[in-house]
Amino acid sequence: MDCDKLVELVTDYLDDALDVDTRARFDLHLLECDGCENYLQQFRATISIVGRPHPDDIDPEFRARLLNALGDFQ
């Protein structure tokens, strides 16, 4: 697994939503990559400070603008 793939999967990892093989590759990558281990810890810290809002709790107009903005990065 490369760093870009790990970043794509981090929320699924934290939600325990990865299949066994993907989780094993994710964990192996963390053992080999200090940058991704730091990224995961920063992600966890952000969640602990900000929380994890449910998508239904986000203002629909703001959510649409955010998704539109993020779509520009793909």
Image: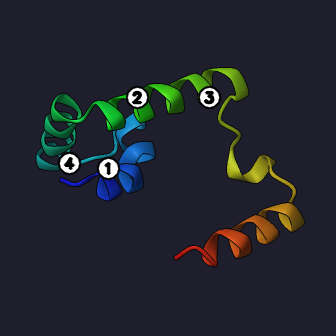
Per the image, the residue denoted by label 1 is 6
State the separation of the CA atoms marked 3 and 4: 25 Å
Q: What element carries label 3?
A: helix
> In the image, is 4 to the left or to the right of 68?
left
Q: Which of marks 1 and 3 is nearer the N terminus?
A: 1
- Checking the image for residue 29, the label placed there is none
Q: Which of marks 2 and 3 is in front?
A: 2
Query: Which of marks 1 and 2 precedes in the sequence?
Result: 1
Identify the disc placed on residue 19. Answer: 4
Residue, x 23% and y 54% (percent of image)? 2
Q: Is residue 57 left or right of residue 54?
A: right
Could you tell me which secondary element the residue under label 1 belongs to? helix
Q: Which amino acid does label 2 sit on?
A: Asn
> Mark 3 or mark 4, which is nearer to you?
3
Q: Which residue is drawn at 23% across and 33% down?
A: 30
Q: Is residue 70 left or right of residue 11?
A: right
- Residue at 45 percent across and 25 percent down: it is 41
Residue 25 in picture, x, y percent from top left = 14, 44
**What residue type is disc 4 on?**
Asp
Q: Quadrant of residue 61?
A: bottom right
How many angstroms separate mark 2 from mark 1 (CA)? 12 Å
Mark 2 in CB contact with mark 1 (< 8 angstroms): no
Which residue is depicted at the point 62% across and 21% down? 48
Contact flag, marks 4 and 1 (Cβ < 8 Å): no
**Which numbered marker is on residue 46?**
3
Ranked by sequence position, the earlier of labels 2 and 4 is 4
N-term mark: 2 or 3: 2
Where residue 64 sits in the image (x, y, percent)?
Answer: 78, 71
Which three-letter amino acid code belongs to the residue tagged 3? Thr
Name the residue carrying label 2: 38
Residue 63 percent location from the top left of the image: 78, 62
